[in-house]
Image (cartoon, grey):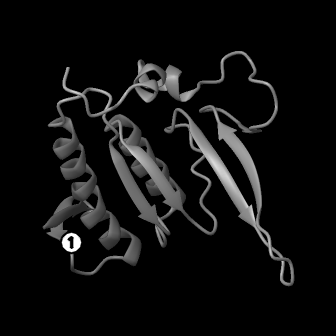
Amino acid sequence: MQRFSDGQWRSASGPASGGERALAVTIPLFAAASGHYRSARHPHAPRLVMLDEAFAGVDDDARASCLGLLAVFDMDVVMTSEREWGCYPTVPGLAISQLSRRDGIDAVLVTRWRWDGRQRLPAGVGRPAGVATAADVRPGAAAAAENTLWDEP
């Protein structure tokens, strides 16, 4: 596998930052997953990708590009991260759950947010005009959620 850097092709495993090497492997996997999911018989079947500590060691511009690429590939992404919110202009919309805990308290506080492609807003507040929902971003998603996703057409 090779990556294009400084005007020439180089080995993806050769001299590069950890983030560059991670991207050289991750991006083809996103493309492969997208291609696999396109083979589903139902157009509203989930296209799930789960990422743990996604893009650790990758700079902000590259993270924005990768998350935008996942949106272009129309992937349904569940991601965990200690610091990544995913709020980039390349991402048309997100539902965010921030988990917080304190020592000595047997509970976890979940604070919900949404990203509308321009700003991060608390999710509990009424939906302002122009804020996309999952049904807006992916036509038919709301209707598909009410039906069995794996029925033959």
Q: Position of residue 60 (x, y in %)?
A: 53, 57
Residue in front for this viewpoint, 86 or 101: 101
Q: Is residue 96 left or right of residue 148?
A: right
**Along the viewing direction, whichever of 59 and 44 lies nearer the viewer:** 44
Callout 1 amino acid: Ala
Taking the image as shown, residue 119 lies to the left or right of residue 102, namely: left
Q: Quadrant of the N terminus?
A: bottom left
Residue at 64%, 48% in the rendered image: 96
Estimate how packed mark 1 is, as few (under 14), some (14 to 19) or many (20 or more) residues with alpha carbons within 10 Å. Answer: some
Q: Relative to 37, is 83 on the left or the right?
A: right
Please identify the residue farthest to the bottom as the structure is shown.
104
Q: Position of residue 83 (x, y in %)?
A: 64, 65
Secondary element at tag 1: loop
Residue 108 position in % (x across, y down): 76, 67
Is residue 60 shown above or below 136?
Answer: below
Vertical order, 114 against 96 (above or below) = above
At x 48%, y 53%, the residue is 78
Q: Quadrant of the C terminus?
A: top left
Task: Give me the residue at 24% from left, 44% from top.
Answer: 34
Residue name at image x 72 percent, y 47 percent: 112
Q: Quadrant of residue 141?
A: top left
Return the residue at label 1.
12
Extreme-top residue of the structure: 129
